[in-house]
Image (cartoon, rainbow, N blue to C red):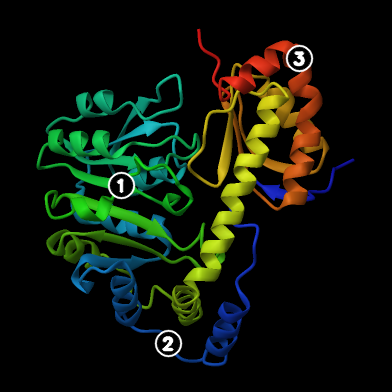
Amino acid sequence: MDIPVLHRLALNESPFPPLPSVREAMRAAVAEAHRYPQFHPDDLTERIAAWCRVPPARVAVGSGSVGVALQLLHAVVERGDSMVYAWRTFDAYPLLASMVGARSITVPLSPDGRQDLPALLAALDHRTRVVVLCNPHNPTGSLITADDLVDFLRRVPPHVTVLLDEAYVEFARDTRLPDALALLDAHPGLLVLRTFSKAYGLAALRVGYGIGSPDLVARVRRQQLPFGVNSVASAAVEASLRAGDELERRVESVTAERERLRRQLVTLGWRIRPSHTNSLWLAAPDPVEDGAAALAAAGVQARHYPGEGIRLTVGSREANDAVRTALAAVGRDRMSGGDAVSVARSGGVVRA
């Protein structure tokens, strides 16, 4: 018998529905659904630019951050060029590379789930047109620090565009988090990619944006689909920008739940490194296959990468408690109580 899904924790969605003020803006926009949206989302672009404190010429808006990424690839990649990225990462990148006829060059993550920046640099050659960095990283939640990012950007050849995917940046609390927008003037080949799907809880409406140099953004905009951002989505984003304080409280709630759940799972014997996203990464050699089965049996839908790990979206308190209960027996079977305490004291990192 199929087990019903009680908690959807597979896609890193927000556990919160849109705010009441955002829903009201959406309802008002629906009343005008017989009218086309703007040919290009110029008004929304200006509002996002003002919110980010950059000129509008630096902002490109598209159908989710993945849509802006595809626009970038169409702008800079020719068939047979290559695109370099760490693997594992966001599943869309291999698909996007295929869509534009680019060769995917993948670089393994380091054993601790980080993107291997020296190896990524070594993979760049004369046919490379784009290198992707995901910061914070999906799915492992690791962070590229400000110093490491600056050093990486200095070493990237000028013919390579750096796509810096910051879909989860609102959930990062580390003081070493880069201020990516402050790096744009020094690096005209950098495009910073962000989204309203995660922290802002508008995943179904598909609005993302890229920030870069005016020349690069102009090339990205030329690949924009006419009427590509609908009026309901635009209204929801604009209302969300006006509700910044309320949304920030929601983000703080998610990050607090992330830390609570991580502490609980570490105490149970799971070795989980700190996360800077709205998810936790349970990695092999911990018993991730048994963990995935236990979660499924409890009606928890998580993202299982067989043989690699489980990405667990941080959900509501009820959902997170269901995760803890489901994984408790698996974690205790994995190691003795003494070992579990040792892991907890080391912050979830087992050192050789």
| Residue 331, image x, y percentages | 74, 22
Residue 27 figure quarter: bottom right
Please tell me whether mark 3 sits on a helix, a strand or a loop.
Answer: helix
Q: Label 2, on which residue?
A: 36
Q: Amino acid at mark 1?
A: Leu
| Residue 270, image x, y percentages | 66, 24
Going from the N terminus, do you reach mark 2 or mark 1 first?
Answer: 2
Please tell me whether mark 2 sits on a helix, a strand or a loop.
Answer: loop
Q: Label 1, on which residue?
A: 164
Residue 176 figure quarter: top left
Mark 2 Cα-neighbour bin, 10 Å: few <14, some 14–19, many ≥20: few
Mark 3 Cα-neighbour bin, 10 Å: few <14, some 14–19, many ≥20: some
Residue drawn where x is 27% and y is 23% of the image: 119
Residue drawn where x is 30% and y is 41% of the image: 132
| Residue 170, image x, y percentages | 45, 54
Going from the N terminus, do you reach mark 2 or mark 3 first?
Answer: 2
- Mark 2–mark 3 CB contact (< 8 Å): no
Q: Amino acid at mark 2?
A: Tyr
Q: Is residue 279 left or right of residue 152?
A: right
Distance from disc 2 to disc 3, alpha carbons, whole Å, reads 62 Å
Q: Is residue 274 left or right of residue 153?
A: right
Comparing marks 2 and 3, which lies closer to the viewer? 3
Q: Label 3, on which residue?
A: 337
Mark 1 Cα-neighbour bin, 10 Å: few <14, some 14–19, many ≥20: many
Residue drawn where x is 45% and y is 42% of the image: 90
Distance from disc 1 to disc 3, alpha carbons, whole Å, reads 41 Å
| Residue 51, image x, y percentages | 34, 71
Q: Amino acid at mark 3?
A: Gly
- Mark 1–mark 3 CB contact (< 8 Å): no
Q: Is residue 254 left or right of residue 71?
A: right
Q: How many marks?
A: 3
